C-alpha cells in the first residue's frame, strides 16, 4: 500500500513538473514582447480614461498590445461611469473577464474584500517569476513593495506609480503679473500671504484701471484642488485636503493625525475666518463650480487660484502664472509640498482567480510590460506621425501611425500632435480615445522624467528624443513648480491595508466625522458659528463619534 501511495505521489509530482515546464516554455522571459510563444486566448476588460463610446478594435495601443504580445485578446469595454456598479456585479456573479485594466476604484479596501476575503482575485505575488521588470522595481523600491501587500501576505493588483520626478498632486498658482503690479514678491509665510492678498484686494492688481474688481483668492470648495490644504500644510500637515494625514514635526519625523482633532486646526479656522471677514476669499467659494473658477481666471479677475494648469484654462495667460511656494507659519518653519504616496492606486490591473496557471502567468507577463521604459514612453506620447503607410509595429523604439500622431514642433520647440480636428476638440481628447485608453498601471498621470531621458537619449530622432535634446521644457507652470515646490516635497499618508473588521470600523467612524467636519468647517470660516464659543463643543462631538478609537486603529497600521 505504501509503495502504491509513493508511486501515485511520484506521478503527481512528475505531472506537476511537466506542467510547470510546459508553462515556463510558453511564457517568454527573455524580452518584453512577445508575452507567449504559442497563442493562448484571454479576455481583458478595459475601463478607459474617458466616458462615452469606444471602438476598442480601433484603439491604437490595444492593437499594439495584440500585435506585440502574441495573445489572442478579446477586449471588453466597461464604460468608466458605470464601472463602479458593473464590476462588483461581475465579481459577485462570477462573470469577470480574465483580467481588468484601468479600474480606478479597485483600491486597498476593494482588494481586501475581493482578494483577501472572497478569493476572487489571483494573488499576483505568486506570479513574480513571470514579471522580471516589476519584480526588479519592487526590489529597488521597498516603499512601493510595502504599500502593496495585504494582511494575508499577498497582493492582488498592479499599481499606478506615483513616485516619479514629475508628480504634482496639489496645484496652486499665483499671478506673477499681479505681484509685480502691487510691488510684492512671492509670499513664503502665512503672514506674507495675507499681505499679498490685501494688496490684491486694495490695488489695481490686474491693471485694468478698476481697483475694485479683483478677487484675491478664487476656488471651488467642493471641486478641484483643495484650498484648505494650502493653509493646513503651512501648519505642519501634509495633506491634499483629506482630514486624515501625516503631521510632520520639526525634527523631520511624522505621525498620523486626524487634523480637525489637533490644536493646529483651530489656528487654521481662525486664519480662514480672518480672510473671509476681510473679503480676501471669493464669496462664491462654497457654492461655485470649478468651471466658474476657471472663468474668473480667464476674465483676469483672480490672483491666486487652484486649477489643473493655467494654460489649459486660458492659453493667453500661461506666462502670468507661477506655481506658488508652500508657506510656513509660526507653528511650522519648514515648507511642505504634498508628494504622492509611492503608489497612486494599487489595483489598476487585476486577474481573475478562476484563471488557470498558464493564463494567469501570461496576463502577469503582459502586465509586466507597463513597468518598462519603452512602453512608458510609447503610452505617454503615442505613435509618431507619418505620412503614407505606417511601418510595421516593432518590439521597441518609436512606433508610427498614418496620418495622425506625435511630432516635434520646431516652431514652438514643444511636443505636438496631428489629430482628427473634425471629431475631437483637442489633441488630449484624441489621444485618450483613439490612441490610448490612457488608464493603465505603471507611471501614468504622474510622469517620470528619468525614463523620458533614458528613452529619448536612446532614440534621439523621436519626439521624446527632441524633447530631451531641447532641455525638456515642460509647461511653464511646471518649471516654476520645480523651483518653488519640488524641493519641499513630502509623502502624503498612503492608503493602508486594514483587516476587514478594522476597515469597517474605521470607515464608519471616519464617515461620520468627515460629514460633521465638512458642515462645521464652513460655518466656522464664514462666522455662522463662533470659533471661541463653539469650538470646544466641536472637539467634544468628535470624541463622541469615536476619534480616539479611529486613531488607535490608524496607528496599528501606520509605520
Image: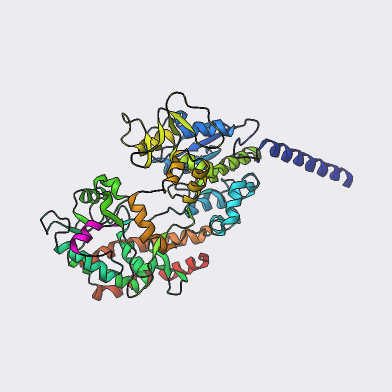
Q: Is residue 62 above or below residue 478?
A: above
Query: Residue shown at 40%/27% (left/top)?
Result: 403
Query: Residue shown at 59%/47% (left/top)?
Result: 133
Residue with the most extreme left position = 209
Q: Please give left or right for residue 546 compared with residue 230 in the image.
A: right
The color scheme shown is rainbow
Q: How many marks?
A: 0
Q: Please give left or right for residue 57 compared with residue 358 in the image.
A: left
Q: Position of residue 491 (x, y in %)?
A: 45, 62
Query: Residue shown at 10%/56% (left/top)?
Result: 210
Q: Position of residue 305 (x, y in %)?
A: 26, 56
Q: Which residues are magenta?
A: 173-186
Quarter of the image with the N terminus is: top right
Do we see residue 89 in this rendering? no
Q: Position of residue 454 (x, y in %)?
A: 52, 47
Q: Please give left or right for residue 94 compared with residue 232 in the image.
A: right
Query: Residue shown at 65%/40% (left/top)?
Result: 30
Q: Please give left or right for residue 310 compared with residue 85 in the image.
A: left
Say if the magenta span includes residue 345. Answer: no
Q: Is residue 412 above or below residue 244?
A: above
Do we see residue 460 in this rendering? yes
Q: Position of residue 89 (x, y in %)?
A: 47, 41
Q: Is residue 515 above or below residue 308?
A: below
Residue with the most extreme top position = 388
Q: Quadrant of residue 191?
A: bottom left
Say if the magenta span includes residue 180. Answer: yes
Viewer-side residue, 196 vs 266 = 196
Q: Quadrant of residue 19?
A: top right
Amino acid at each position: 500500500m505504501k509503495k502504491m501511495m509513493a508511486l501515485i505521489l511520484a506521478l503527481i509530482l512528475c505531472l506537476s513538473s511537466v506542467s510547470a515546464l510546459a508553462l515556463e516554455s510558453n511564457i517568454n522571459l527573455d524580452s518584453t514582447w512577445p508575452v507567449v510563444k504559442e497563442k493562448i486566448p484571454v479576455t481583458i476588460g478595459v475601463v478607459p480614461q474617458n466616458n462615452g463610446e469606444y471602438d476598442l478594435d480601433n484603439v491604437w495601443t490595444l492593437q499594439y498590445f495584440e500585435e506585440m504580445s502574441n495573445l489572442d485578446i478579446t477586449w471588453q469595454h466597461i464604460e468608466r461611469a458605470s464601472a463602479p456598479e458593473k464590476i462588483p456585479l461581475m465579481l459577485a456573479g462570477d462573470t469577470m473577464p480574465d483580467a481588468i485594466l484601468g479600474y480606478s476604484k479597485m483600491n486597498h479596501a476593494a482588494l481586501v474584500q475581493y482578494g483577501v476575503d472572497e478569493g476572487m482575485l489571483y494573488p499576483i505575488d505568486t506570479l513574480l517569476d513571470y514579471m522580471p521588470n516589476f519584480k526588479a522595481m519592487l526590489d529597488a523600491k521597498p516603499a512601493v513593495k510595502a504599500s502593496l501587500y495585504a494582511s494575508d501576505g499577498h497582493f492582488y493588483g498592479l499599481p499606478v506609480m506615483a513616485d516619479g520626478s514629475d508628480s504634482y498632486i496639489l496645484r496652486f498658482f499665483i499671478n506673477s503679473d499681479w505681484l509685480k503690479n502691487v510691488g510684492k514678491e512671492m509670499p513664503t509665510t502665512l503672514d506674507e500671504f495675507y499681505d499679498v492678498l490685501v494688496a490684491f484686494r486694495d490695488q489695481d492688481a490686474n491693471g485694468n484701471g478698476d481697483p475694485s474688481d479683483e478677487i484675491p483668492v478664487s476656488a471651488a470648495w467642493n471641486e478641484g484642488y483643495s484650498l484648505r490644504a494650502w493653509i493646513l500644510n503651512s501648519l505642519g500637515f501634509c495633506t491634499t485636503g483629506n482630514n486624515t494625514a501625516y503631521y510632520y514635526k520639526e525634527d523631520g519625523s511624522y505621525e498620523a493625525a486626524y487634523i480637525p482633532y489637533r490644536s493646529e486646526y483651530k489656528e487654521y479656522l481662525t486664519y480662514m475666518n480672518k480672510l473671509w471677514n476681510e473679503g480676501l476669499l471669493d464669496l462664491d467659494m462654497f457654492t461655485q463650480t470649478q468651471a466658474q473658477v476657471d472663468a474668473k481666471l480667464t476674465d483676469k479677475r483672480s490672483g491666486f487660484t487652484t486649477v489643473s494648469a493655467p494654460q489649459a484654462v486660458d492659453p493667453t495667460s500661461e506666462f502670468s502664472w507661477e506655481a506658488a511656494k508652500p508657506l510656513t507659519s509660526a507653528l511650522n518653519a519648514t515648507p511642505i509640498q504634498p508628494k504622492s504616496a509611492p503608489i497612486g492606486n494599487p489595483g489598476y490591473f487585476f486577474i481573475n482567480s478562476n484563471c488557470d496557471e498558464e493564463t494567469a502567468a501570461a496576463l502577469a507577463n503582459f502586465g509586466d510590460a507597463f513597468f518598462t521604459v519603452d512602453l512608458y514612453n510609447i503610452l505617454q506620447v503615442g505613435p509618431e506621425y507619418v505620412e503614407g503607410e505606417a511601418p510595421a509595429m516593432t518590439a521597441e523604439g518609436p512606433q508610427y501611425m498614418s496620418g495622425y500622431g506625435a511630432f516635434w514642433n520646431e516652431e514652438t520647440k514643444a511636443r505636438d500632435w496631428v489629430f482628427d480636428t473634425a471629431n475631437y476638440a483637442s489633441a488630449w481628447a484624441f489621444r485618450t480615445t483613439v490612441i490610448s485608453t490612457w488608464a493603465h498601471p505603471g507611471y501614468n498621470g504622474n510622469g517620470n522624467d528619468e525614463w523620458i531621458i533614458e528613452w529619448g537619449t536612446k532614440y534621439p530622432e523621436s519626439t521624446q528624443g527632441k524633447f530631451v535634446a531641447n532641455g525638456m521644457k515642460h509647461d511653464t507652470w511646471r518649471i516654476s513648480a520645480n523651483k518653488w515646490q519640488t524641493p519641499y516635497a513630502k509623502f502624503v499618508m498612503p492608503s493602508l491595508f486594514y483587516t476587514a473588521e478594522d476597515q469597517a470600523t474605521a470607515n464608519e467612524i471616519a464617515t461620520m466625522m468627515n460629514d460633521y467636519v465638512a458642515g462645521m468647517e464652513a460655518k466656522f470660516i464664514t462666522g455662522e458659528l463662533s470659533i471661541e464659543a463653539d469650538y470646544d463643543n466641536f472637539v467634544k462631538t468628535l470624541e463622541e463619534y469615536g476619534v480616539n478609537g479611529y486613531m488607535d486603529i490608524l496607528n496599528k497600521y501606520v509605520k
